[in-house]
Image (cartoon, rainbow, N blue to C red):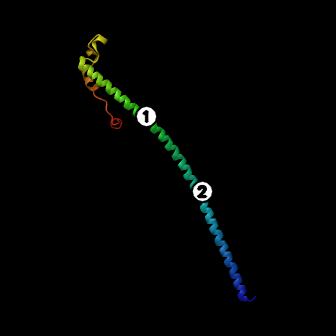
Amino acid sequence: MDQREQRRMISNRESAKRSRMKKQKHLNDLMTQLSQLRSENNRVVSSIGMITQHYVSLEAENSVLAARVTELGHRLRSLNEIIEFMKQQVVDTGSWFPDEHYGGSGADLIDSVSYVYSCQPIMTSIDMNIM
């Protein structure tokens, strides 16, 4: 073998060695990136789990609150009906209570100032959604 072939062979070996080292470095970089991505993925999955639990909790709370809104709306309507009935009772008899049931006019039971305020309908912002 002449010197020229020998130099070329050595050069090819060194080039192949550099190529293998470059390939190994690239593989190591990819393995590092894979490890980081798996770690990030685990954090995201954990975060999604916590957010899902929070969402389910909020949905349950929302259902309870919606039922409460409905219940309070019914109660409000009932109380307003009672107020209207009592107001009509005053118009019809001049008293909150019919004389034949309670043996008197009932005027002594009612303070005129509280009467004015007690005859006011109970209003809430919920009324707009319910009615």
Asked where in the image residue 93 lies, by quadrant, the reply is top left
The secondary structure type at the circle numbered 2 is helix
Q: Is residue 118 above or below residue 38?
A: above
Q: Nearer the viewer, residue 129 or 119?
A: 129
Labels 1 & 2 near each other (Cβ < 8 A): no
Q: How crowded is mark 1: few (under 14 residues within 10 Å), some or many (20 or more)?
A: few
Q: Name the residue under label 2.
A: 38
Disc ID at residue 67: 1
As drawn, is 87 to the left or to the right of 52? left
Query: In the image, residue 110 lies at what x, y percent?
Result: 27, 18
Q: In this view, does 84 lie above or below 38?
A: above
Asked where in the image residue 89 lies, by quadrant, the reply is top left
Q: How crowded is mark 2: few (under 14 residues within 10 Å), some or many (20 or more)?
A: few
Q: Nearer the viewer, residue 107 or 128?
A: 128
The secondary structure type at the circle numbered 1 is helix
Query: In the image, residue 92 lies at what x, y percent?
Result: 24, 18
Measuring 34% from the left and 26% from the top, which residue is drawn there? 79
Quadrant, the C terminus: top left
Most extreme residue toward the right is 1
As drawn, is 111 to the left or to the right of 7? left
Query: In the image, residue 51 lies at what x, y percent?
Result: 51, 47
Front: mark 1 or 2: 1
**Label 1, label 2: how many angstroms apart (C-alpha)?**
43 Å
Specify the amino acid type for callout 2: Arg
Q: In this view, does 41 lie above or below 98?
A: below
Specify the amino acid type for callout 1: Ala
Measuring 25% from the left and 25% from the top, which residue is drawn there? 116
